Image (tube, rainbow, N blue to C red):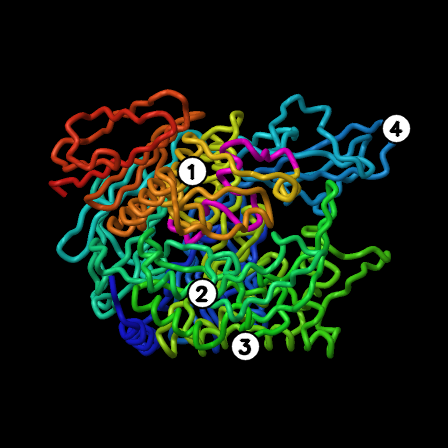
Amino acid sequence: MSCSTSWLINGFFFLTAWYTNAQLTHMPYPAKTILLDPQTSHIILSDYLGEIDALPTFEFPAGISASYDSISSKMIITSEKNIAPLMPLKVDFGSKSLVLLLQKSQKQKTIFTVPDPNHEYERVNLVGDINAWNPANTAMIYRDSLWIAELYLLPGTYGYQLVINGVWQLDSANPHTMDNGIGGLNSKLVVPSKYDGTAPELQTDRETKDGFSLKLKGNIDQVFVLWQDSLLTTTRENDQLTIKIPQIARDIKRSYIKAIGYNDTGVSNEVIVPLDYGRVLKDPEKLCRYDKETNIMYYIMIDRFWNGNRTNDRPLDDDEVYPIADFHGGDLHGVFQKLKQGYFDSIGITSIWLSPIIKNPEGKFGLFNKGGIKSKFSAYHGYWPISFTEIDARFGDKAILKKIISEAHRRGINIILDYVANHVHEHHPLYIEHPDIATQLYLSDGTLNTEKWDEYRLTTWFDTFLPTLDLQKEQISEMLSDSMLFWIEKYDIDGFRHDATKHIPLSFWRKLTKKINAFGQQTGKVILQIGETYGTPELINSYINAGKLDGQFDFNVYDAILAALCREDVGFDRVAEKIKESLLYYGYHNLMGYMTGNQDKPRFMALATQEVRLDEDTKLAGWSRNIDRKTKRAYKKLLLMHAFIQTIPGIPVIYYGDEIGMTGGNDPDNRRDMKFDNLDTAQVKLKQNVKRLANWRRSHPVFLFGDFSFEIVEFDFLVYKRKYFDQTVYIILNNSEESKQFDIPNLASSTPSAWMAPHLLKERTITVPPYNFEIIHIRHDKI
């Protein structure tokens, strides 16, 4: 799985020269289908076209009109009510053109009312999954003895509450409730789908002499097929669609074909087929680390990973700082040593995500003061920058960072750098000299603008000593984006994990991505950008697409699978609903991050043993008691989590230590020192299975590019399918106390194998033991 950058260089320059003369535009990855809003939608064309040096012209589908502002490159689209479910919008500018697919909104008008005949309430707000749990987002209006809010919502299940005169409460007029994930209840709203019947489905079928075919299910009215965002002509015969690959694709190492269709019941799944020099990519050996889909990411909290150089140890050793909040000595030398020893190879990792390495302050800051425990913090974690380009000496220097990157690349591993763009520490020299680079600490009413995550999302400070950068100022965003590009140019890193993404304006991410894309076209360098946003899928999705980030961590799916595996009252039905929601927003072939754990969450093991509960203060739990319970069932559940993230669409992300079942409460107890030696039998077995899962994913492109569909969704039993040409995979998750059975269809003329029993299967019925999983891989011999 090795490759050089030369194919990318040739590909970029070839396409740059070619699309100027031929009416096509190259996109490194197909643009996402654009989800329209019910009435008006905004599109920034420069996200898709880059620099626009000519006035574009448009070919609008029926029922769509738009206005265009050439200065901002913003297109405001107005859609009529009875438009097609899926439509192509053709854009021409100069000698270039592309096609954007527009999907009709599935949102439905939903009206909330609160009776108040005597107008006793001063104010009523609506809050819930519908608006990122921010009361300020939805103030209800008093009219005709009612408080009213009208919203457009997608079909699905929503938890919500009312905030009446500042008091949060359930909706007394709604008898339906659901758990809130932390031991309480929310009012429950179910928005039904307006479509009757089953949505159409596309499946990869077989290769042909000069292309491939798709199987169509569900009386599909029309299928749009694009190569690099240009429409292709196809041949359709009954339920089969034949696609001819453009001749020009043979000169390019990696390009993509995208297909998506519709009928009167809705829009199908999308199919994306990667091409290798114009042929369908089916051989995993033709993939390499430049293919973003191949990332299997591993997060390292550097200070807690491995101490490879004790000469740079500088703990505070301060009575006001508990040891758990002080420096422990981990450094880049330790990362390099484990890299050289082959640790990351031993668990199948293809991408290492390093916690921030930029210089942080000396001294102690912040305060934890609960339950009789009082401690300040050192900057061991790296998230309090006092530089933009200097490496913290407690972690290492330029030389060791370059050695890590060189060795990682030699092994086919990417290095992703965690970068803090939202804020600086108050000791940052630039802030000391120019405090106006930051937003205001105090609001107009005199209150502190701290930790107001949603109400003042773009200006709030994380703490009084962490000034938020005012990145809406051009000079500041220009400087910071240049500083981030510095790390790519000087050290050859392979991407960024962007901290606190939603607290930074979209204009900054567009500026940064524009610079990264320009650098990539000059050098062939491929950069992965993945963000961190807690919020609604709509908010998360607003940061993703061409011209912005590749993906973000999907905390909504994470929270659902965590609850399903670690609580008795939540099931896989919630997981399936969240996955369907994510596939709608982010696409069936997305680059979202799906994690086993996170540095801001309690450890999975602690939740699975129920030694830590989600309805308690999980941070206080980590500070106040020794959390060390591990059980056989908890190890099985953690392996279920690993199996889940390795087999769904997206990028698997392993939080350091989750490959051996480390435990702990929330931050900072979830950041214990990594354990490498004296592992017990359960830890060794889990680690071996994590490697097997990663190797299965790496050796079977069906996990990277396969179609996705649910086969069985029950409270404690989940089966989903991935299919990619001649390969079909069934993933079977059993989270119950009893064995479960699944009948595998279509075993005729096929070669099946199983995860638990690698020998060829003899029976069609598979039995999965309690708290276990099975992966059935089928190669269809006649395709």
Image position of 94 with respect to 38: above or below:
below
Labels 1 and 3: the sequence-earlier one: 3
- Give amino acid for label 1: Leu
Q: Is the magenta stretch mostly helix, strand or loop?
A: loop
Q: Is residue 694 visible?
A: yes
Q: Mark 3 points at which residue?
A: 482
Labels 2 and 1: the sequence-earlier one: 2
CA distance separating discs 2 and 4: 71 Å
Callout 3: helix, strand or loop? helix
Q: Name the residue under label 2.
A: 308
- Give amino acid for label 4: Asn
Q: Name the residue under label 4.
A: 118
CA distance separating discs 2 and 1: 29 Å
| Residue 699: x %, y % from top left | 24, 51
Residues rendered magenta in the picture: 589-616
| Residue 318: x %, y % from top left | 69, 60
Residue mark closest to the camera, 1 vs 3: 1
